[in-house]
Structures are given as C-alpha cells and as structure tokens.
Image (cartoon, rainbow, N blue to C red):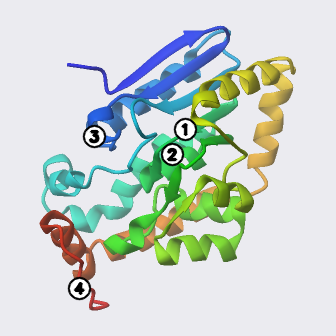
Amino acid sequence: MAELVIVEERDEILEIVLNRPEKRNAINFALYDDLAEAIRQAERAQGVRTVLLRGEGKSFSAGIDVTNFLLLAERYGEGWQQRMRSITRDTQEVLTALERLELPTIALLHGHCLGLALELALACDIRIAAEGTQLGLPETRLGMIPDVGGTTRLTRLIGPGRAKELIFTGRQIDAGQAAAWGLVNQVVALEHLQAKGETLAAEIAQAAPLAVGMAKRVIDGMHDLDRGLQLEGWAQSQLFQSEDFMEAVKAFMQKRPPEFKGK
C-alpha cells in the first residue's frame, strides 16, 4: 500500500508530499494522521533549513474527504456531536504544530486547493501557486465554517472584508485573484512550480537560521491565533448539531443541491 504522506530530505530541504493522487489528495483521517507525523519529523530534523509542502498528481488537494463525517462516530464514539470542540481542537493542533515550526514552510499549490487543503496552505509561511490553481473555502455550502484555522488565518492574511466574501460565498478563486488579494505570494507556470519553491528555499537558506526562526515567531506573535481557534471550535460545535449540516452531508452523498432551512 502506498504511503499517504511521503517525507524526503535533500539539500537542506525537507519535502512533505501528499500522496493520494487518485483521490486528488482528499484528506481522510489516515492521511491527516500521517501528516501529523511528518510535521513531528520536521521538528526533529537536523540540518534542514526549509520545509516544502506539495501534492502528488493533478491537485495539491481537493480538501477534506467528506466520508470522514461518516466515520466520526467510529473514531470518537457515539455522541460525537456533543464533543465537537474537543474534536476540532484535535484537528487544529496538527496545523498549529505546522505553523509553529521554527523552520520556514513553503506550500506549492496546483490544480485545486480547497477547504481543509487551503487551511493547510494557510498554516504555511509562504504560498506559491501554479497558474490556474483554484482556491476556496466551501465550508458554508456544507453548513459549516472553516474551523481548522481557516477563518482566523485567512482574515489575518487578507483582511476581514475579503475573508468574509470568500467564506460567506464559498466560491473558488483562481491563482491570479488569490495573488491580487495577497492569499498567495507568487503565481508561476506549473512546470516551474517545483523549481521556484526550491529557489526560494535556497535563498532563505542564505540567511541566519536563528534569525529566520525568531523573525517568524515575532511576526506570528502579533496576532491572537489561540483566541481565533477557540472561537472557530465553539462555532463549529454549534453548527455540527444543526439540521442544515446534516442536510448538507446527505445532499453531498446523494449528489444533489442541499435545501437549507436555517435550523
């Protein structure tokens, strides 16, 4: 069975690769667990100066594997909807660990970067996107909010007005629009994506690693991330008990538009 997350070290770079290409790297529980282990490996790595994160195949990632919702009772027990704040906290901790690495992190995006995948990219320091990449947070169309740091980190990055527009509508935007909004740092041709990431990593490696790590901590410390994550968890715990959320999951599985009632 193929590894769902591949970790490879070379030339002061640690590369983390999402490796479920047949599902557009949709993030199921097994992949997410492996991602958590990859981040722990990055924390322990010696001689690494930069982390590159990318997806194998046609997309960075299509986001969460919606079948995860059907497995929540199996993973967390009956009555999981009453435990949503702790479940959300467990999920948030993985991306918070990624964000709090002292190593600089660069996400290389292509194809699709949606939902949880965009939240993953937002936890990185720098995002480079291939031309034509589609980005978005469609959670409100499923009766949820982006609760794995997406609401908090997106607002911090592009401001409340644009964050509200993207989250309220659940729409997708292309890489060019994402760059104009400051959501991604650069847009390049797909065939140059890997090289651009490695070139930037080499440039970062010329700076003093302690200084880079401290600069990252100071910049990230200017915002109250922890309070934002707590608010996300509280809001999601309410939404997962709503009729609209259950209707959204059923509609998705039945491949039909949901009929929301605001309940």
State the image coordinates of residue 255 (x, y, percent, origin top left): 17, 67
Q: Is mark 4 on a helix, strand or loop?
A: loop
Whichever of callouts 4 and 2 sits on the residue coming sooner in the sequence is: 2
Residue flagged by tag 3: what amino acid is it? Lys
Q: In this view, does 144 lie above or below 22?
A: below
State the image coordinates of residue 146 (x, y, percent, origin top left): 46, 63
Q: Gap between marks 1 and 2, in whole Å?
A: 11 Å
Q: Determine contact: label 3, label 4, CB under 8 Å.
A: no
Q: Is residue 109 above or below residue 255?
A: above
Q: Gap between marks 3 and 1, in whole Å?
A: 25 Å
Viewer-closest of 260 and 70: 260
Residue flagged by tag 4: what amino acid is it? Glu
Which tag is nearer the camera, tag 4 or tag 2?
4
Residue position for label 2: 120
State the image coordinates of residue 245 (x, y, percent, origin top left): 26, 75
Name the residue located 73 percent from the left edge and 60 percent from the top edge.
180
Whichever of callouts 3 and 4 sits on the residue coming sooner in the sequence is: 3
Residue position for label 3: 23
Whichever of callouts 1 and 4 sits on the residue coming sooner in the sequence is: 1
Q: Residue 259 carries which label?
A: 4
Q: Is mark 3 on a helix, strand or loop?
A: helix
Q: Is residue 110 above or below residue 175?
A: above
Q: Is mark 2 on a helix, strand or loop?
A: helix
Q: Residue 97 carries which label?
A: 1
Q: Determine contact: label 1, label 4, CB under 8 Å.
A: no
Name the residue located 19 percent from the left edge and 47 percent from the top edge.
75
Residue flagged by tag 1: what amino acid is it? Ala
Q: How crowded is mark 4: few (under 14 residues within 10 Å), some or many (20 or more)?
A: few
Any part of residue 120 in sight: yes
